[in-house]
């Protein structure tokens, strides 16, 4: 697909006409099963699980396992994110089982509950950049990258404001589903701790640290930087066309996990991740007319 940014003229269109054109373009990228997004979680989780016997039996060194595991945990969230938006299949469709399976299983390296992330993520979309209601807002306040890293490190400490952001969000939601999700998350963390204790008891504490605990923390920080801070910083703007911004990534769109096109996700969340850069290029003149915070054409690919 061409990586040239579209250059059609929308100067004479009113708001309703822009909206109609925007929806027609967005619709072209929706409702098609993305094979790469199906293969991604299968390979990623399979790779991470395979690291354990490979490292514990000495087939590959621990340092290499740590590097691979860090990539695995960093890549674990986004397939589940697709499932949170019913991108693989909507309720009632025959592939719904695939949507839910990917939603749950892709998160194993992150030790997170799919339902917790889905419920809190929906609140993020409803209340983007609203301090009291957006559970991700705590992670968007850093003035610099280092500030953002410090906020993330603090979030791993009991009792910090950022560590309670998701729990507080579930409490605000207040449904039985939210309560069940919270309990599920506790069960997942207890199970993870049990794995750590067993590993330590049998002399594999360092392996548990470097194959799971530390990669998980690094991966979560990387995700929060690219999925929360960079697309929404400084986190003051609200509104459909104002709450998300374009940004440049140091190794191109995919070092940011596709988040340089995050504005498309917020506008049309059912577009698959791997289609958002192309959708951004085609929607660019419309978003430019909407005065969205975009990169200039030279850097918006």
Image (cartoon, rainbow, N blue to C red):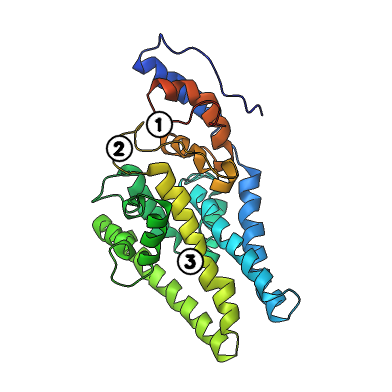
The residue indicated by pointer 1 is 293
Q: On the picture, is 205 further left or further right than 91?
A: right
Residue at x 38%, y 61% (from the top left corner): 150
In the rendered view, would you say 90 is above or below 178? above
Going from N to C along the chain, the mark reached first, 2 or 1, is 2
Q: Is residue 41 visible in this depiction of the protein?
A: yes
Q: Position of residue 9 (x, y in %)?
A: 49, 12
Q: Label 2, label 3: how many angstroms apart (C-alpha)?
A: 29 Å
| Residue 216 appears left or right of 239 | right
For residue 105, above or below residue 134: below
Image height of 292 relative to 206, above or below: above
The quadrant of the picture occupied by the N terminus is top right
Q: Quadrant of the C terminus?
A: top right
- Disc 2 vs disc 1: Cβ atoms closer than 8 Å? yes
In which quarter of the view is residue 186 placed?
bottom left
Q: Which mark is residue 237?
A: 2
Disc marking residue 105:
none
| x and y, in percent, of residue 71 in the image | 60, 60
Q: At numbered mark 3, what does the secondary structure look like: helix, strand or loop?
A: helix
Q: Earlier in the sequence, mark 1 or mark 3?
A: 3
Q: Earlier in the sequence, mark 2 or mark 3?
A: 3
The span from disc 2 to disc 1 (Cα, nearest Å) is 10 Å
Q: Position of residue 7 (x, y in %)?
A: 54, 17
Circle number at residue 217: 3
Give the quarter of the image for residue 15: top left
Element at label 2 = loop
Residue drawn at x 26%, y 45% as measured from the top left: 130
Going by the picture, which residue comes out furthest to the top? Answer: 12
């Amino acid at each position: 697909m061409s990586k040239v940014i579209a250059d059609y003229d929308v100067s004479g269109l009113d708001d309703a006409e822009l909206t109609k054109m925007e929806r027609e373009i967005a619709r072209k990228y929706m409702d098609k099963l993305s094979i790469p997004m199906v293969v991604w979680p299968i390979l990623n989780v399979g790779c991470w699980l395979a690291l354990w016997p490979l490292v514990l039996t000495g087939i590959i060194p621990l340092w290499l396992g740590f590097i691979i595991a860090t990539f695995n945990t960093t890549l674990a969230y986004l397939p589940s994110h697709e499932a949170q938006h019913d991108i693989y299949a909507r309720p009632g469709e025959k592939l719904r089982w695939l949507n839910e399976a990917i939603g749950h299983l892709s998160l194993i390296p992150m030790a997170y509950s799919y339902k917790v992330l889905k419920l809190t993520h929906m609140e993020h979309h409803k209340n983007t950049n609203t301090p009291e209601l957006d559970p991700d807002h705590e992670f968007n306040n850093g003035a610099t990258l280092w500030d953002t890293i410090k906020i993330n490190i603090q979030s791993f400490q009991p009792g910090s404001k950022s560590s309670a952001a998701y729990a507080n969000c579930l409490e605000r939601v207040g449904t039985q589903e939210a309560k069940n999700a919270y309990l599920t998350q506790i069960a997942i963390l207890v199970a993870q701790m049990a794995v750590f204790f067993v590993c330590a008891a049998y002399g594999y504490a360092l392996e548990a640290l470097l194959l799971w605990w530390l990669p998980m923390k690094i991966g979560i920080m990387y995700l929060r930087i690219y999925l929360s801070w960079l697309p929404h910083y400084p986190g003051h703007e609200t509104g459909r066309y104002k709450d998300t911004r374009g940004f440049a990534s140091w190794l191109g769109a995919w070092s940011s996990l596709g988040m340089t096109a995050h504005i498309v996700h917020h506008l049309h969340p059912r577009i698959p991740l791997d289609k958002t850069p192309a959708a951004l290029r085609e929607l660019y003149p419309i978003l430019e007319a909407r005065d969205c915070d975009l990169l200039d054409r030279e850097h918006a690919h």
